[in-house]
Amino acid sequence: MDKEIAKLVNESDHKTLTIWAADCAERVLPYFERNFPEDNRPREAINAGRAWVKGKLRMVDARKAAFAAHAAARDTGEVVTARSAARSAGHAAATAHVPSHAIYAAAYAITAICDATNLDDVAMAKEREWQHQHLLKLVNGAMGS
């Protein structure tokens, strides 16, 4: 993962990382939902992470949502874009439990882009740049609060 992103992750607070992870996962969620429109486990995981940040959900419940999203990923079979998107959502929710999961939410989002675009370096670089700029914005907003 990009060194600048890794540095920001190490310097960021738990709630900021959870928001960032949820935002990263949400960007690739359509890859899952297009293929499995009836399965809401990844969306619920993203929502669980956001609810934890607001103090509306216990960490243990966010963790359960993360496990459910990872189960959804296992249920995708050979649909690799959907699997990566569900894994991203699972790690986004798991960030409520352990902050270091945020980097995996971002990495799986990049993997989903990679899978969807057949290794398009430009698309992956754009997503990585969005992740970096978005985390910078969140960190600067949190510091200004």
Image (tube, helix red, strand yellow):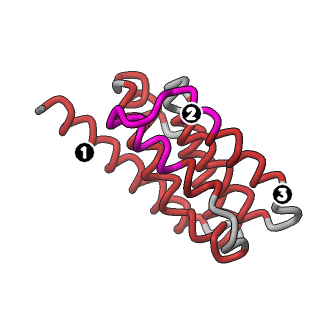
List x then y, in percent, for residue 108.
63, 49
**Quick one: label 1, few (<14), some, or many (20+) residues within 10 Å?**
few
Q: Quadrant of the C terminus?
A: top left
> Residue at image x 47%, y 43%?
21
Q: Nearer the viewer, mark 3 or mark 2?
A: 2
Q: Secondary structure at mark 3?
A: loop
Q: Is residue 33 found left or right of 73 in the rendered image?
A: left
**Quick one: label 2, few (<14), some, or many (20+) residues within 10 Å?**
some
Q: Nearer the viewer, mark 1 or mark 2?
A: 2
Residue designated by label 1? 137
Q: Is residue 118 found left or right of 2 in the rendered image?
A: right
| Amino acid found under the numbered disc labelled 2 | Asp
**Quick one: label 3, few (<14), some, or many (20+) residues within 10 Å?**
some
Name the residue furthest right. 77
Q: Secondary structure at mark 2?
A: helix
| Amino acid found under the numbered disc labelled 3 | Asp
Q: Read off the magenta span.
A: 46-64
Q: Nearer the viewer, residue 50 or 123?
A: 50
